[in-house]
Structures are given as C-alpha cells and as structure tokens.
Image: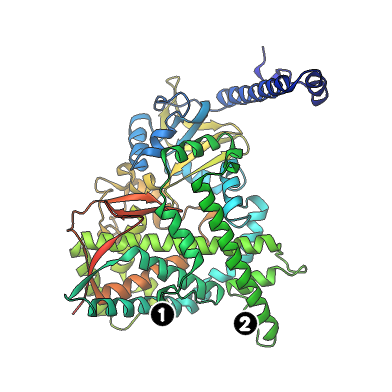
Amino acid sequence: MNLFTIPVPSPSSLWTTVRSGGAFNIACSFAALWALVKVSRMLRLRVKTTQLLGPPRTSLIYGVSRDLALSHDRAAMYEHWATEYGVVYMIPSVLGQTNVVLCDPKAIAHFYARETWTYVKTPLTLAFLESSIGKGLLWSQGETHRRQRKALTPAFSNAAIRKLTSVFYDSAYKAKGKWDTIIESSKDDDAVIEVQNWMNHISLDTVGIAGFSHDFGSLDGRRVSVAEAFDTIGSNQPSAVDKAVFLLASVFPIILKIPNKRQNLFTQLGITMEQISNELLIRSRREKDANMSQGGEENSLIGLLIKSEGQDAELHMSAEEVVAQMKVLLLAGYETTSIGLTWALIELSRHPDVQTRLREELLAFGPDPTYDQLKANLPYLDAVVHETLRLHPPAGESTRLAAADDIIPLSEPVRTASGNMTDNISIAKGTLITISIAEINRSSAIWGPHAKEFKPDRWLTEDGIGGKAKEVQGHRHLLTFVDGPRTCLGKDFAIVEFKTVLLVLVKNFVFEMRDGPDTPVETVRGVLPRPRVAGEDGTGVPLRVRRYE
C-alpha cells in the first residue's frame, strides 16, 4: 500500500457525516482527521529524510525536549550527543516529532545560506513573535524579510555608526559618574554594585538616543515602563509547568492563546513597547514636519522608518511593520548588549590578569579612541569582546522548519541509523532542524581542548583559531550573530557599543566578584538567558567595584 495515497475525506463528505451526529461525533471526526494527517506527514518525513543515530527518548510525550528544557547547560548535552552519534544526529521531540541537529560547519553554512527561504521559522516561533513583538524583522521571512532589511540597512552602515560613537561614550561616562558618586558615599574605597541593572540602563538609554533621538533617562533614575516590563520577566522564572506548556505549544501553537502568568508578562511587554514606539513615532513625525527644510535625518533609524511609511516609498512598510521594527530594536538594544556587557564584567572579575592586561592596553593608548581606532587599534580589547561573545552568545540555539526538500552536505561522513556511511543527508519538507549556537561556539571538536576556557589570547595569534573553527562561516568564525540572510543587522552597532562601554569602565574601575573569584554564576531566563550570581534574586550580579588609581 502506498503510504502517500491514503484517502482523506473531502470537506463535503466530512460535513455530511458530522451533521448526522452530535458534538461527540464531530469531535471524534476531527480528531481522526487530525491523526490521519499527522501520521501521513510523519511517515513521509521518515521515508524521505535520512534516518540518523541519536539519543533514545526519555519521555513518551516529550522525547528528550524536557531534559533540554530543564538542563542548566543545553550546549553540553548537544556536544555530548555529537561526540557519541556524529556531527549530525536526530533527537526525539514532543509527541513523536524528531529534530535533526547540525553540528557540522559545512552543513551549518549550507543551512544559513538558505534561511528565510528553504528553512523558515516554526509556527510556534512565528506565533510567539507576532504576539509579543509584531511582524518586524525577527518575524518576517522570504521577500518580506528582504524588503524590511533593505529599508533599515542604511541606519547600520559604518558611516551611521561612526556618528553614533559619541552617544555610546556619553552613556558610558554617565554611568561612570554615577558609580563615582556611589563609591564616594561608601565608607570604604569600594562599593558593591549590581552591574547587570546598570548595563540595562546603559543599553536602554543608548538605543533610545541612537535609534529614536529620545533619552529614556534610566541612568538618571527615571522610571521607564519598558525597562520595568523587561525586569519583571527576569524576576519571574518559568515554572516546570510553564516549560511543559511551551513544549506542547511546539505541536499546538494555539496553546499560546491560553493565558498563563509568563505569557501574560510577554503580552504586557509587547503592549508596553508598542505604546512607547507609537509615542516616539508621533513625536518624530511632528519634528520632521517642523524641520522639513533641514533634511539629513533619513539615515537615522527613526528617519528611515518614517520615510518608509510613505505610499510612494520604494521600500514601503505598513504602520504595523514600522512599530514592529521599533519593538525589535528596543528588544535587541536592551537585552543582547546588556547581557554581553554583564558577562564581560563577570569574566574580567574571574580573571584579574586579563582585566589588568586590558586596562594596561587602554591606558597606554591614551585618549578615548575614535570609531576607526576602536575597530583597528586595540587588539586586546577586541579579543576580550569576541571571547565573551564566543562563550556567552545571547541566543543559544535556533530551530527552523524545512519549507522544501533539500540535501545538506557534510564535511565528514556520518553513520546512519541503518549502519551506512554518508557525506550528505536528505531533508524532507516539514523536517525540524536545530543548531545549538552555544555548542558550536564552545565545542572542543571545533575550538580545541581549551574551548570552554576564557582565553582572549586565542584571537591574537595566527594559529590561535585553527582546525574546524576556521570552517565556521559566521562573523569571526562565531555563530553569535548567525550567518546568511539573517545575519544580525545591528552587529557592528553592538560591537562598537560593547567596546566603548567596556573601555570606559575598565579604564576607571577595578572589578572583583563580591564573594571571591570562584563565586558560582548560573544562567536564568529573562526575555533571553541572563547570568545571575547563584543565590541572588531575579538576575542579580553584584560585583565589588573600586576606582582605579
């Protein structure tokens, strides 16, 4: 019997059948139809997708997904499986689904080159993004993504970021001034400062001024509703029930419509970001109308967004899309940069020798470097920043859905479930593909025996990055900013802001872990995973800070 010619009832015959029955019969009929479609689809996937080795399921319902969700180090689990089963393997997922996991640089490069077209976001991801952020750059795919990205690109050019460098310095020096005051008021020569909260303030005020010509004033102690919404999510960790519900939503995305505490927090965050975005847009439109003769604002982010609203704009965006782009920038500007800076301060506190060497380079350089000097003249600063980005990518993994059949090449052969060796794998339309960004960034097979260690020196020598790491095709051989059509548009913005803030803080202050260099640090959920000193509330990272004399 041909598995793909199983007869499916027509809508008219199904309706005739259920009209003669009651609610129970209707429910049973739709359940049977759903099961028939799911079984047919799973059989097709099994026949057309190369069957690979992988870990056994530990749960009939969740496969190994629950183990991953509860793990404190998902990347280590992915790496263990890659060592045991090969550079590509299958893991059992929710309700009989399977995911193909790619740990091979050649396979990953192939995947990213085809993202947004052959490999697209899952229904769950799309539903979640639409409900919280809207139909902006993170949500869009294919031609819509290309159009939105092209409209925003001028705001992130080298010329645009060069002009914004002074904004980065202003925020960093404002934080420095506040910290000076805190230390002066302390009885000792130092003070314990919760640095993650301050990195949030720096990031929010910077993105407000740089992106929207608006100072949120969070560094001045002003109450900012969007910051409170972000912080509330970080203070309310997902329960085991929340995690289970989210896993089931990967099969039934409509579950996201069912209210629960954490989902309500994300909904409120979306509403808050939309209110702020609309207020900023209204103000900016008025300013544009009042200063029509001045021009020169169209390459700012807010200027480009307002320009794209025009019906005659070459890269027109709807009002809904414009607001969504602002929400994306608020999210990216607040979360990713502040997380990276917090991890950098943690690593420098854990490694005082690295901190001292970095400070010596910065002090020897002299005055604050320009944009071009930040990019080219401070090699150890560059090394510290990229080592932090390698070990602590803000987004640890991504899962996509194959929108078409494909064949993925491999850099080395793997053994299939049938025992044969192959140097490529067949992927059927509908297959789930997972890439663990954190695993690729810290894999011993790719980065060598010291892959898990914080070693900025690896970025300073020709042979510091060798072997398979050179085959990874992301920025500087990292997947932190992903690759291909979805490479992070704000990558250069983020790196220059990261370098600027770290430079100002390390030149002026010395950082230590409050309870000693071996203080345990864990990862908890905010909107994205965030560091937290073990035992602290929320996302607290208290460090002992003193002035550098």
Q: Is residue 194 visible?
A: yes
Residue 142 relative to residue 400: left or right: right
Q: Is residue 490 visible?
A: no
In which quadrant is the C terminus drawn? bottom left
* Mark 1 neighbour class, 10 Å CA radius: few under 14, some 14 to 19, many 20 or more: some
Q: Which residue is mark 1?
A: 170
Question: Could you tell me which secondary element the residue under label 1 belongs to?
Answer: helix
- Name the image quarter holding residue 502: bottom left
Identify the amino acid type marked 2: Gly
Count of numbered marks: 2
Identify the amino acid type marked 1: Asp
Residue at 21% across / 54% down in the picture?
519
Numbered circle sitting on residue 296? 2
Q: Residue 515 at what x, y percent from top left?
A: 18, 58
In which quadrant is the N terminus drawn? top right
- Name the image quarter holding residue 149: bottom right
Question: Could you tell me which secondary element the residue under label 2 belongs to?
Answer: loop
